[in-house]
Image: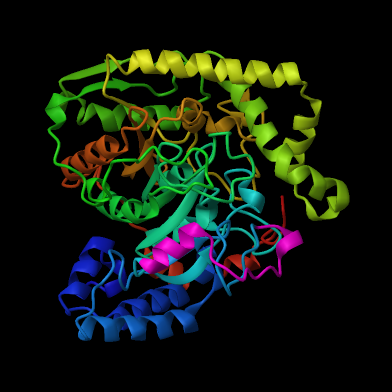
Amino acid sequence: MTSPCDLTATEARALIGAKRLSPVELTESCIARAEAVDHAINAFAARDFDRALKTARQQEEAVMGGEPLGALHGLPLGVKDMVETAGLRTTYGSLAYKDNVPENDERLTAVLREAGANVLAKTNNPEWSAGANTRNAVYGATGNPFDPSRSAAGSSGGSAAALACGMVPIATGSDTGGSLRNPAAYCGVVGFRPTPGLIPSERRGMAWLQLATLGPMARTVADAGLLLSVMMGEDSRDPLSGIAAGEMPEDYATPATLDLSSLRVALTPDFGFTPTESIVRDAFGEKTGLFRSVFAVADDTHPDCEGADEAFEVLRAVGFLGPHRRLLEESPELVGPNVRANVEEGLTYSAADVARGLELQTAMYRRWQGFFEEYDIILSPAVTVSPRSWRELYPKEIDGQPTRTYFHWLALAYASTLPGHPSLSLPVGVDSQGMPFGLQIVGRRGGDAEVLAVAAALEAHLAGDARTARPAPDLAALEAAPALSTYEGFMSFD
């Protein structure tokens, strides 16, 4: 019998609205699942179980009283520990903020609560979301639900791991170089990086730099679309806000029905420049070989990404230098290696270097727009390597070749970050190591609804084949596993 916590968000919300599932029952089920397995993966950071149960009882009264219900009414929610939550510890994974309890919700938390989402816990992330291995010196490491000794990736690793295990049906994430897509791929869930501006944020310190964006995470495409429909909007405090002007949340809440045979698709394992591991290349070839014939056109090609590494390295460093330089100067003992590396790198760049980075990004953007005149969608792997040990701060080599930086292994993701195109990671079976494989679906800039529609159609097409269906972790094995906190190196930066 399916536990309430294993229902999809859309299923659970429909049952709540029909008075066939109590918000209390759902919340209690999610809490029970967390208490059963989270010791093995450490996905949850600060917990708010007592307040969540109180809220669930109030939500049940609203249902039984026939009151109007929000789109997310009664759904337990995981909130990434980068997002501020009133009365609930928000640390950003930083020792400098280990005791920080915000007085107010930021916009994202507020609109999700208004829609009826019930904050169950904060989810773990690396310090200031720097790096794609979820480890910090406040809450420790997060393990992969399919093998807790391996990384759940990041930076939204806690959200992805919690979703995979049924600890929550929906969760928030954010993405600069794949922080939504990487953990979704590693944990067998859906992570969607929207076009920057679709989801406003009043807290981005360098708001004109479009690399970072908030986004939804869930177990299914429909659930991600439902969450996105609430997260999106307009806010004058974010200068990029407004890309959704004139569009309705309903366009995203239920992905449109789409005929896959109408699509012109480009397939690439590496965008011509990423250091993709042979395990990942093989999985990509095998998986897409099972369904590429369904498209009208399926060409092995990619847009020109010349200068991508250089542009991302410079602009990422600038993005970290602004908000984190002072902390490094005043309290260096409270700053971990990834943040330190970005700030120190940023200090080496001149104005000419930054100008060149922006020029490279602009040139790449324009080449991508020309490419999308010929193709509707790009398919690639979501991450360059199969999950490795979380003790490895980052892959220093891939198939014997050294990586350029601690984030070079994220190049498949930042390829689409630079031109600002919406990108979704869809779970498609497992690789030869038995670990989840994520397929990246990249669409036109502003074509977020189309990306969701393509992903939903592919999800349905692939669900009936064990080789391509969404995998699920062994919950019984996780229940019996030792606590991740007993592993050597659990509570550290590196």
- Viewer-side residue, 230 vs 400: 230
Q: Is residue 106 magenta?
A: yes
Residue at left 53%, top 51%?
150
Q: Is residue 167 magenta?
A: no
Position of residue 61 relative to residue 337, above or below, is below
Toward the front, the furthest residue is: 236
- The magenta segment is 93-114
Residue at left 22%, top 74%?
16
- Viewer-side residue, 231 vs 27: 231
| Residue 156 in view (yes/no) | yes
Residue 137 position in % (x across, y down) = 71, 60
Position of residue 408 relative to residue 369, above or below, is below
Q: Quadrant of the N terminus?
A: bottom left
Quarter occupied by residue 342: top right
Residue 38 position in % (x across, y down) = 49, 69
Q: Is residue 17 left or right of residue 28?
A: left
Quarter occupied by residue 460: top left
Residue at left 27%, top 82%?
62
Position of residue 152 relative to residue 242, above or below, is below
Position of residue 462 relative to residue 163, above or below, is above
Residue 486 position in % (x across, y down) = 64, 68
Q: How is the structure coloured here? A: rainbow
Q: Is residue 7 left or right of residue 483?
A: left
